[in-house]
Image (cartoon, rainbow, N blue to C red):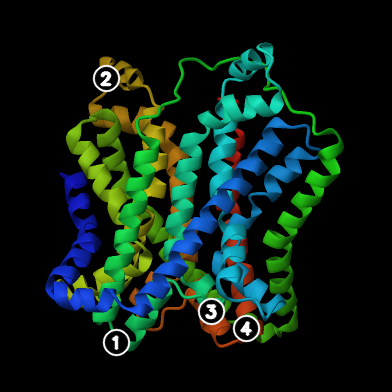
Amino acid sequence: MLAIAFAAAAMIPVAYVLQAAVAMGWDELATLVFRPRVADLLANTVLLLVIGVPCTVALGVAGAWLVERTTLPARRPVTVLLVVPLTIPAFVASYGWASAVPSIHGLGGGLLVAVLAYYPLVYLPVLASLRGLDPALEESARSLGMNGWRVFVRVVLPQLRLAILGGGLVVALHLLAEYGAFAFLRFETFTTAIVVAYQTSFAGPNAAALGVVLATLCLVLLVVEASARGRLRYARVGSGSQLPAPRLELGRATPLVMAGLVVLVGAAVVVPLANIVRWAAAGTAADWTPLTSAAWQTVGLATGGALAALAVAIPVGWLSVRYGGRLSRTIEGALYVASSLPAIIVALALVTFTLWAIPAAYQSVATVIAAYVLIFLPRALVSVRAGIAQVPESLEESARSLGVSPVRARLRVTAPLLLPALGSGAALVALGAANELTATLLLAPTGTRTLATGFWSAASAIDYVAAAPYAVVLVALSIPAVALMLAQVRARRSR
């Protein structure tokens, strides 16, 4: 019943979009949608997806393949450096680039910042998949006369398809939902236009019409990814060959590859961080004073969002793994569809719902945490579900055969084994919540200033010195969660 209630609550943003379209009527909706302004936004957004997603996939796959399947020097440091951009929120990276190159703007600037910020979202799942592949398949292909490149294209790459499609979908949804990075670079997408329309007309018809188009784009992406994925499965029984996978000799290409990696890491990490540190060093001690309050509010909201997301993810994940069926799939699918909508749509839906049903909840901490749950629930659900699936039910049955009640058996046997998955899921949600900007700006109580909103307030006023300390603390808070993600990926082969 809890899972059904959560799924019903998660439908609020979807219902908001449908209600806005129905209430507006086709004539008014068509007038607002079919106009040059929307065509320009659609062109910008589609170009961003069509160019940006393949670029992030190419960088992510190439980086994972280089560190896992070639004789690249210094593979361990390179493995870590390639994931470091995840510690830098996209809008902070945009701020770093804009302060270094003031002329950067438009589609080119948006693509540069977005690709550099989001390619680790493909790199990490592909790296995990590469470490989990059975090397025996590659050895067999080599024994049949294939060289290293043909083995990669014909044997390895097809097995990475699920990771690539999943990572590409996540990147595409991030590109649709991103506001701060593109607003900073004066590049208009549907999300930036919705925020502007909301700020000028308070959820007026323009924002609702744009929201309908944006939600439709999200659903199209989900359908395309599901169609491309089909029923592919690459699970195997057993741990596979214990021998390490063969590595391709880079030979004379090594200096060129290393130079490319230096350029990539320099653009994705060094440029943003160097400018953050430069502006932070230019400030005075008084500039750091508001950080204490902002840091505590950020930690409080992020922790609340993480715990609430776990509270939803645990019963849903348990139902999905232990009692799989049509109902559990429907509930899980409803949660994923709701979470695929951009944060601005979720925020607008909660504004409308709270003003209609619970006025006292409007601009409250509870509403902000509810938004974080809706937006970031898949991060917790994926980790929790995987953790539950890895706990053998026979352990609980053994405990119960010794006279332990079902509840005590779960608390004493299953719960301790789930702690790593729960910690990972909570860290991922907390990382997203700490960096969330759009929903926090719209839903947070008056006087609330998180690190992200504090940074945005100063940076949008071109006060780079005041914004820098917020960026430094945001990056520092992101490091533990990213380190945990990388540690889980690197431990994949040893399981």
Assign a secondary structure to mark 1: helix
Locate residue 422 relative to residue 469 in the image: left or right.
left
Q: Amino acid at mark 3?
A: Arg
Q: Kindly report which numbered mark, 2 or 1, lies closer to the viewer in this rendering.
A: 1
Residue 203 horizontal/vertical position (percent)? 27, 80
Q: Quadrant of residue 345?
A: bottom left
Residue corresponding to mark 4: 466
Give the mark nearest the N terminus, 3 or 1: 3
Visible residue check, residue 310: no
Q: Kindly report which numbered mark, 3 or 4, lies closer to the viewer in this rendering.
A: 3
Give the mark nearest the N terminus, 2 or 3: 3
Residue 329 horizontal/vertical position (percent)? 24, 38
Label 3: how many residues lie within 10 Å, few (<14), some (14-19) or many (20+)? some
Q: Kindly report which numbered mark, 3 or 1, lies closer to the viewer in this rendering.
A: 3
Badge count:
4
Residue corresponding to mark 2: 400
Q: Kindly report which numbered mark, 1 or 4, lies closer to the viewer in this rendering.
A: 1
Image quarter hosting the N terminus: top left
Residue corresponding to mark 3: 186
Residue 125 vertical placement versus 336 (above, below): above
Alpha carbon separation for disc pair 3 and 4:
21 Å
Locate residue 113 relative to residue 345 in the image: left or right.
right
Give the mark nearest the N terminus, 4 or 2: 2
Give the mark nearest the N terminus, 2 or 1: 1
Visible residue check, residue 489: yes
Q: Kindly report which numbered mark, 4 or 2, lies closer to the viewer in this rendering.
A: 4
The disc placed on residue 201 is: 1
Q: Amino acid at mark 4?
A: Ala
Alpha carbon separation for disc pair 1 and 4:
29 Å
